[in-house]
C-alpha cells in the first residue's frame, strides 16, 4: 500500500482489502501526462497545504516528500501520502468544501492539478480517469465508515432531528462523528464546554469549532458550504429530485450539451439511495449499494457539467 491509513486514525480500516485501490501509486507515465494540466509547488516541512473547508480544491500529486492528511475538527492524523501518490476524494470532482486538511510532513514537492482539469481527465483519459474516480469513491466510502473525521453531531438516538441530521450526512456522503446523549455520559460534559443545554440538542460542531443548534437541512448545508449559489442564468434543463430517474436525466441532459441543474431537498439517490443492496439494476450483475449507485451517477452528471444543488428548496 503506497499511501496508507495510519492505525492512530483508522485502525479498523488498516486491513481493508479496498485500500490498495483507494490509495494507488501513479506510474511515471501517468504523472508525466498530468504535467500539462498543473504546476509544480513546494512546501516546507510543517507548512499547511490546505485547510478543511476549502472549496474547489486542487489535486496534489506527490513528487518528493510526504504529505500528512488530518481531520479538520480533531486534528487526528488520518493518512500519509508519499511519492507517486495523489490527494483528494470525491470532493475534488464536486468542488464541495473538503472535510480534511493537509500538512507537509517533510519538505514537499507536488504537482498541483485544478479540480476542473481533473474532471476533464476523468472524462477524456479513460485509463487514468478510472484510477482516479475509483480511488476518490473508495476513499470517501472508507472515511465515512470510520466516524473519525468531519463534524461532530451530539444528540439523542430518540430525537427525530438527530435522526434527520445523521441521515442528511449519510445521504450526502459527508463523514461525521455521532455522540449519543444516552450512551456516553461524557457527552453531557462536552455540551457544557460548548455552553449548550440538552434541550438545545441536537447540535453540530463544525470543523472550525462553530456550534450549530438543531439546524435544518438548508441551514446545515449553508454552514458546511455544501450549498452553492445557483448561477443567474436560464438553464436548458432543471430537474427537481435527485433520485435515480433525476440523476439519469441529469447525466443524459448534460452529456448532450444542455445546461443542466439538479435540485433535491435532502440528498442524491432518493429512496434507492438508502438500499443496502440493489441486484436488479441493469449493468451490475453482482449488485451494488444504493449509495454507490448515487455516487457514480452524481460523479457522472457533474463530469458532463451538470450543476447539483443539494439541499435545495423549490417553490412555485
Image: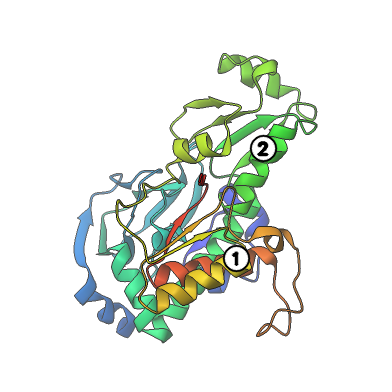
Q: Residue at x 51, y 51 (%)?
A: 310
Residue marked by disc 2: 178
The foreground one among 117 and 220 is 220
Left-right relation of 299 to 67: right
Disc 1 is placed on an element classified as helix
Give the residue furthest to the front.
Answer: 316
The foreground one among 9 and 51 is 51
Neighbourhood count class around disc 2 (C-alpha, 10 Å): few under 14, some 14–19, many 20 upward: some
Q: How many marks?
A: 2
- Using the rendered view, name the quadrant where residue 183 is placed: top right
- Of the numbered discs 2 and 1, the one sitting upstream in the chain is 2
Residue 118, horizontal then vertical, whole percent: 34, 70
Residue 138: mark: none
Q: Nearer the viewer, mark 2 or mark 1?
A: 1
Res. 25 visible in picture? no
Res. 9 visible in picture? yes
Residue 293, horizontal then vertical, whole percent: 62, 70
- Using the rendered view, name the quadrant where residue 198 is placed: top right
Left-right relation of 250 to 281: left
Neighbourhood count class around disc 1 (C-alpha, 10 Å): few under 14, some 14–19, many 20 upward: many
The foreground one among 248 and 148 is 248
Residue 190, horizontal then vertical, whole percent: 63, 21
The foreground one among 261 and 172 is 261
Q: Residue at x 61, y 69 (%)?
A: 245
Residue marked by disc 1: 294
Amino acid at each position: 500500500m503506497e499511501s496508507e491509513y495510519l492505525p492512530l486514525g483508522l485502525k479498523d480500516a488498516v486491513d481493508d482489502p479496498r485500500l490498495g485501490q483507494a490509495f494507488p501509486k501513479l506510474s511515471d507515465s501517468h504523472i508525466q501526462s498530468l504535467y500539462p494540466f498543473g504546476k509544480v509547488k513546494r512546501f516546507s516541512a510543517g507548512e499547511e497545504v490546505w485547510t478543511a473547508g476549502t472549496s474547489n480544491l486542487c489535486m496534489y500529486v506527490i513528487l518528493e516528500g510526504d504529505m500528512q492528511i488530518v481531520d479538520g475538527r480533531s486534528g487526528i492524523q488520518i493518512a500519509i501520502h508519499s511519492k507517486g501518490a495523489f490527494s483528494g476524494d470525491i470532493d475534488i470532482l464536486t468542488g464541495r468544501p473538503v472535510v480534511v486538511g493537509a500538512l507537509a510532513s517533510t519538505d514537499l514537492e507536488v504537482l498541483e492539478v485544478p479540480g476542473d482539469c481533473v474532471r476533464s481527465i476523468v472524462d477524456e483519459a479513460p485509463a487514468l480517469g478510472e484510477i482516479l474516480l475509483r480511488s476518490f469513491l473508495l476513499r470517501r466510502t472508507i472515511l465515512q465508515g470510520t466516524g473519525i473525521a468531519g463534524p461532530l453531531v451530539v444528540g439523542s438516538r430518540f430525537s427525530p432531528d438527530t435522526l434527520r441530521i445523521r441521515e442528511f450526512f449519510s445521504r450526502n456522503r459527508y463523514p461525521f462523528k455521532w455522540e449519543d446523549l444516552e450512551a456516553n455520559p461524557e457527552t453531557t460534559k462536552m455540551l457544557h464546554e460548548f455552553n449548550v443545554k440538552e434541550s438545545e440538542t441536537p447540535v453540530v460542531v463544525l470543523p472550525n469549532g462553530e456550534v450549530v443548534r438543531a439546524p435544518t437541512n438548508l441551514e446545515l448545508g449553508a454552514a458546511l458550504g455544501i450549498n452553492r449559489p445557483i448561477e443567474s442564468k436560464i438553464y436548458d434543463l432543471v430537474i427537481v429530485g435527485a433520485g435515480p430517474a433525476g440523476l439519469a436525466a441529469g447525466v443524459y441532459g448534460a452529456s448532450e450539451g444542455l445546461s443542466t441543474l439538479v435540485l433535491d431537498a435532502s440528498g442524491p439517490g432518493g429512496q434507492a439511495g438508502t438500499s443496502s443492496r440493489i441486484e436488479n439494476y441493469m449493468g451490475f450483475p453482482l449488485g451494488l449499494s444504493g449509495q454507490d449507485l448515487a455516487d457514480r451517477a452524481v460523479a457522472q452528471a457533474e463530469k458532463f457539467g451538470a450543476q447539483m444543488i443539494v439541499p435545495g428548496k423549490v417553490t412555485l
